[in-house]
Amino acid sequence: MPTSRTGRPPVQRAPRRPAGSRPPRDNAVVRLHGRARRAWDRPLTAYYLILGGSLLITVLGLVMVYSASQITALQLSLPGSYFFRKQFLAAVLGGLLLLAASRMPSPLHRALAYPILLGSVFLMILVQVPGIGVAVNGNQNWISVGGPFQLQPSEFGKLALVLWGADLLARKQEKRLLTQWKHMLVPLVPVAFMLLGLIMLGGDMGTAIILTAILFGLLWLAGAPTRLFGGVLAVAATLGVILIKTSPNRMARLACLGATEPGPGDSCWQAVHGIYALANGGLFGSGLGASVEKWGQLPEAHTDFIFAITGEELGLAGTLSVLALFAALGYAGIRVAGRTEDPFVRYAAGGVTTWITAQAVINIGAVLGLLPIAGVPLPLFSYGGSALLPTMFAIGLLIAFAREDPAARAALAMRQPRFGRKRAAVRGSAGREPRKWNTMRRRAAARPSGER
């Protein structure tokens, strides 16, 4: 063995690596993608998306209702904040309903299905009684509840169909009856068509479309075969074509698809001025409160076409933010429905998600000129207490279902309690050893990283 001049054996050096064989450096995009994916897969992701997304949509909607309704209120010789105050009151009541629904267990939700259905049917019958029902914009779908407040029972019919249909399908699945087509259709489809008939008596086809979408969503989640699903869809499409052909107003709305001019008799005035409002907004909008179209040019600026005013005042950035919030809400609802083993939770969460997503698509599609104007509000965003109350209760359902997931429940149990409770417990235990809080978190932190 050769030795060095000092008599020691020579140091064995590692061979140099070729320049092309070095390990690749960690890419920042890959790290960011990994972090986002881990955050996306956390148990409480759906819970926070539903809670945060719905609250952001509601708050932004209140701001836009105040901005879009001022001119309309002044034209009616009302205070500028008239519609905003009514919407704010409805949002407070809806928040209480959301909180109550989010704290209810699933058996209580199922127990409410039949009372809500019977109450909705009774109110929709009262709408057609002369002297009780009130006609608004040619549709008799309202009941006066005193003063300036009116109630639209068909909005509660959506919630009724979701809860009752989910409970019905869950009970039939537990008895293994959904493999037979008659049990899948009866009595779900007849009851849904009864609700559709009561709604169409008042002429509200937009709400009828949403109810039809909920029905199809429930049948899809129940595993309806393609032939059965296609048959129900064909019947609904045939009835829809007949209802459109027999109504000159609906035919005129259908003729305004893609219109760029108001047309003869200003038949496409609303659709065209909705496009004008979006075009005036540009990238970042003209500024909050600086809309031009709300000065009498765009009808229903604070209700059905509030998305157009949002685009004019907040620009493309504002409209994309609203779309992103609805997309996050829809994804969270699908995630809750897909990860549960409770059939009622799956059907109810899927029905609520179908309801909110379909209504948002129909409203925004009409504003963009891609769909006929159906007269449906943007969920949680447009003015209207009758639409806001059942929608916020439905959001409370999604929050309750997200909390009931076993992984989410364990994550919520491991959260650190509030500081005020901890300090109060220490003060109240004078002369005694303070209570050990957050034991599960301490045990988890004491484990080695490989066991967590």
Image (tube, rainbow, N blue to C red):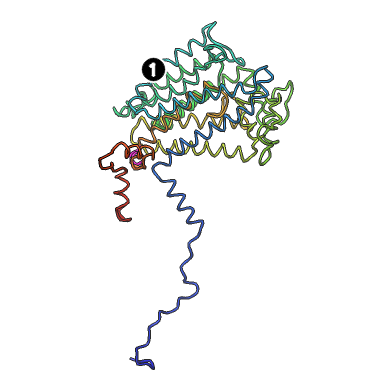
Q: Residue furthest toward the top?
A: 131
**Which amino acid type is marked by label 1?**
Pro
The residue that mark 1 highlights is 115
Percent x, y for residue 397? 41, 29
Helix, strand or loop for the magenta stretch, by majority: helix
SS type, badge 1: helix
Kindly identify the residue that appears in the image at 37 percent across and 92 percent down: 6
Q: Quadrant of residue 186?
A: top left
Tell me how many marks there are.
Answer: 1
Range drawn in magenta: 405-409
Crowd tier of the residue under label 1, counting other residues whose Cα lies within 10 Å: few below 14, some 14–19, many 20 or above: few
Q: Does the magenta stretch include residue 41?
A: no
* Residue 361 place in picture, x, y as percent: 55, 32
Would you say 445 lies left or right of 290 here?
left
Residue 160 in the image: state x and y as whole percent: 43, 21
Does residue 300 appear to the left or right of 103 in the view shown? right
Residue 59 lies, with reference to residue 29, above or below; the image says above
Q: Which of 448 and 134 is in front in this view?
A: 448
Q: In which quarter of the image is residue 429?
A: top left
Q: In this view, does 444 lie above or below 419?
A: below
In magenta segment, residue 406: yes
